[in-house]
Structures are given as C-alpha cells and as structure tokens.
Image (spheres, helix red, strand yellow):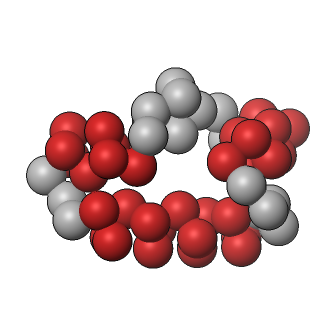
Amino acid sequence: MVAEGRSNAEISQRLSLALSTVKGHNLRIFSKLQAQNRTEAVARARDLGLL
C-alpha cells in the first residue's frame, strides 16, 4: 500500500489497525531496506524484486 501511495492513515483504516501500528511497521521496513523515507523504501524494494 505504501507503493500505491497510500498514507499511513489510509492504510490503518483499510487494514483496521491503529495508526501507531502502521507507523511502527513502516519504521521496521525502512530499517530492513536501509531507507530513510517511503520513496527510498519503495525504490529499494523494487530494485530487490520485492514489488
């Protein structure tokens, strides 16, 4: 959903999760992909063939 450009609020609402949960997952994803932000994370995931 991050790659689709959805905001954290949209993701939390769509998946029925707390906003803080979505933010926490994003931070862990960014860390694993060694990305500083959403754009870098999506680009890195694409480069790695994850998307």
Residue found 32% across the figure and 70% down from its top: 21
Res. 45 in view: no
Res. 27 in view: yes
Residue 6 placement (x, y as % from top left): 44, 33
Q: Is residue 20 left or right of residue 25?
A: left
- When asked about the image quadrant of residue 28, the answer is bottom right
Q: Is residue 33 left or right of residue 4?
A: right
| On screen, residue 23 above or below 1 | below
| On screen, residue 44 above or below 6 | below
Residue found 71% across the figure and 73% down from its top: 31
Residue found 80% across the figure and 60% down from its top: 35
The total of numbered circles placed on residues is 0
**Which image quadrant: the N terminus?**
top left
Q: Is residue 22 left or right of residue 15?
A: right
Q: Is residue 24 left or right of residue 42?
A: left
**Which image quadrant: the C terminus?**
top right
- When asked about the image quadrant of residue 17, the answer is bottom left
Residue found 21% across the figure and 65% down from its top: 18
| On screen, residue 15 above or below 32 | above
Residue 9 placement (x, y as % from top left): 32, 47
Furthest toward the top, the residue is: 4
Residue 27 placement (x, y as % from top left): 58, 70
| Closer to the camera in the image, 39 or 50 | 39
